[in-house]
Image: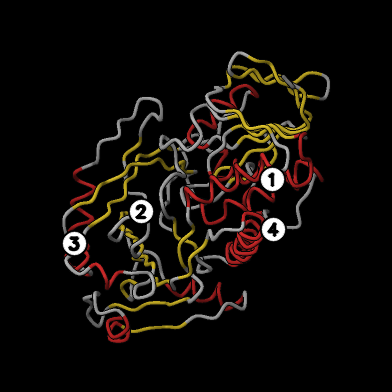
């Protein structure tokens, strides 16, 4: 069994699988990916039918990164010979005075040359009659928004990484990381591996890995949930008839048209309670679900129907909800990525960026705002703001 590699990726969720894939395109058999659970497990953040993908973001650097995300997914689709992104169009909507102002999103898209439409409540309801809005509501529509096929994309990244020569090992929990003479020794699943560069993409378990370097980052792990409904008229929520949508206020909600189940999906964003990722249960939060139902009753009542099921997942949240993409403090060849509960759309692009950092020492992508050394991450008790 080979134990010496150029790069080891710790964690094979959405971003880690993306990193293993992009590394394998450059380094082939010199890549090892380690996952503490079974591949495709549902204990973390990335395993469901769908995630929203969009060019609409609150800052220009995120919009530019989203452009890279679409390009990365297109390249993976070409390599995999299967579709991984379904464009449905996307609606960001909310009160004209809200906790998440649409003007910042409009300005960011405009600065990046992304076309969009401003819609009033009447036009939103004309296009999609399922909405029930009054004149205080407005929205932004962007035609390239849609669904990133999460479980399918994870499997494609993993399959392609192996086809390009990478070794992926699951059920291999990391028990020790040590730096020795310009390389890293990683103990996982009872086996000792060595590598020249290391990528930590461990999501809720990131601080456990970072502890081996004497580093801790202020992260809050929350248990979130999504619910699939079986409405009376499911056809009006088919992808060719209904957009992905995000309610831009506090609390924030989001949803997708029918994909993967015979009904649409909806959820509150960042509405969960803090949990220990190893001790958390998988039962739905009834208060969270009640908030979602009240929102749907008011604004999209025909989406409600019998529950197909509610699925839980985790968010790993820095206090400002910005990504972390950087070297681990004190390390030249060890890198950390935190997706902040909104990264799956970027998973392949972030994987590519990590491969560039590991192989070249730098990336052409603008990741300057995602430093682990930014001031808020240095505070003992930083203020939290999750509305993006």
Q: Quadrant of residue 51?
A: bottom left
Q: Nearer the viewer, mark 1 or mark 4?
A: 1
Horizontally, residue 130 falls left or right of residue 170, namely left
Disc 1 designates what residue? 354
Q: Nearer the viewer, mark 3 or mark 4?
A: 3
In space, the residues marked 2 and 4 are separated at their CA atoms by 26 Å
Estimate the x, y position of residue 99 in percent, counting from the top left: 36, 64
Residue appearing at x 32%, y 83% in the figure: 127
Assign a secondary structure to mark 3: loop
Upstream in sequence: badge 2 or badge 1: 2
For label 3, count other residues whose C-alpha is less than 10 Å away and answer few (under 14), some (14-19) or many (20+). Answer: some
Residue placed most toward the observer, 229 or 164: 164
| 284 to 81, vertically: above or below | above
Residue 1, numbered label: none
Residue 269, numbered label: 2
Q: Quadrant of residue 129?
A: bottom left
In space, the residues marked 1 and 4 are separated at their CA atoms by 13 Å
In space, the residues marked 3 and 1 are separated at their CA atoms by 41 Å
Upstream in sequence: badge 2 or badge 4: 2
| 176 to 234, vertically: above or below | above
CB contact under 8 Å: marks 3 and 4:
no
Upstream in sequence: badge 1 or badge 4: 1
Residue 304, numbered label: 3
Q: Nearer the viewer, mark 3 or mark 1?
A: 3
For label 1, count other residues whose C-alpha is less than 10 Å away and answer few (under 14), some (14-19) or many (20+). Answer: many
């Amino acid at each position: 069994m080979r134990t010496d590699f150029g790069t080891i990726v710790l964690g094979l969720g959405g971003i880690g699988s993306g990193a293993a894939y992009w590394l394998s395109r450059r380094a082939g058999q010199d890549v090892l990916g380690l996952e503490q659970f079974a591949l495709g497990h549902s204990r973390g953040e990335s395993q469901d039918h769908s995630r929203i993908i969009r060019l609409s973001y609150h800052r220009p650097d995120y919009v530019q990164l989203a452009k890279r995300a679409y390009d990365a997914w297109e390249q993976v689709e070409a390599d995999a010979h299967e579709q991984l992104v379904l464009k449905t169009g996307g609606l960001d909507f909310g009160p004209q005075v809200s906790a998440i102002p649409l003007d910042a999103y409009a300005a960011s898209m405009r600065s990046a040359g992304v076309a969009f439409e401003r819609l009033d409540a009447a036009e939103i309801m004309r296009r999609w009659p399922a909405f029930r809005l009054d004149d205080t509501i407005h929205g932004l529509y962007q035609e390239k928004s849609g669904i990133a096929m999460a479980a399918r994309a994870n499997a494609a990244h993993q399959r392609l990484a192996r086809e390009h020569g990478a070794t992926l090992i699951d059920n291999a929990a990391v028990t020790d990381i040590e730096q020795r003479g310009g390389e890293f020794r990683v103990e996982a699943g009872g086996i000792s591996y060595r590598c020249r560069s290391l990528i930590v993409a461990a999501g809720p378990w990131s601080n456990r890995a970072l502890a081996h370097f004497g580093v801790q980052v202020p992260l809050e792990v929350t248990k979130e949930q999504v619910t699939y409904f079986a409405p009376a008229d499911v056809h009006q929520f088919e992808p060719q008839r209904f957009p992905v949508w995000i309610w831009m206020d506090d609390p924030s909600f989001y949803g997708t048209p029918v994909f993967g189940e015979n009904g649409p999906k909806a959820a509150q964003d960042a509405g969960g309670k803090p949990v220990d990722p190893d001790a958390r249960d998988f039962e739905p939060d009834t208060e969270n679900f009640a908030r979602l139902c009240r929102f749907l009753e008011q604004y999209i009542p025909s989406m409600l129907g019998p529950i197909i099921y509610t699925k839980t997942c985790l968010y790993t949240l820095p206090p400002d909800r910005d990504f972390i993409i950087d070297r681990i403090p004190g390390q030249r060849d060890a890198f950390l990525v935190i997706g902040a509960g909104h990264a799956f759309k970027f998973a392949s692009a972030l994987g590519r960026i990590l491969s560039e950092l590991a192989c070249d020492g730098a990336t052409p992508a603008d990741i300057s705002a995602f430093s682990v050394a930014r001031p808020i991450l240095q505070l003992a008790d930083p203020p939290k703001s999750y509305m993006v």
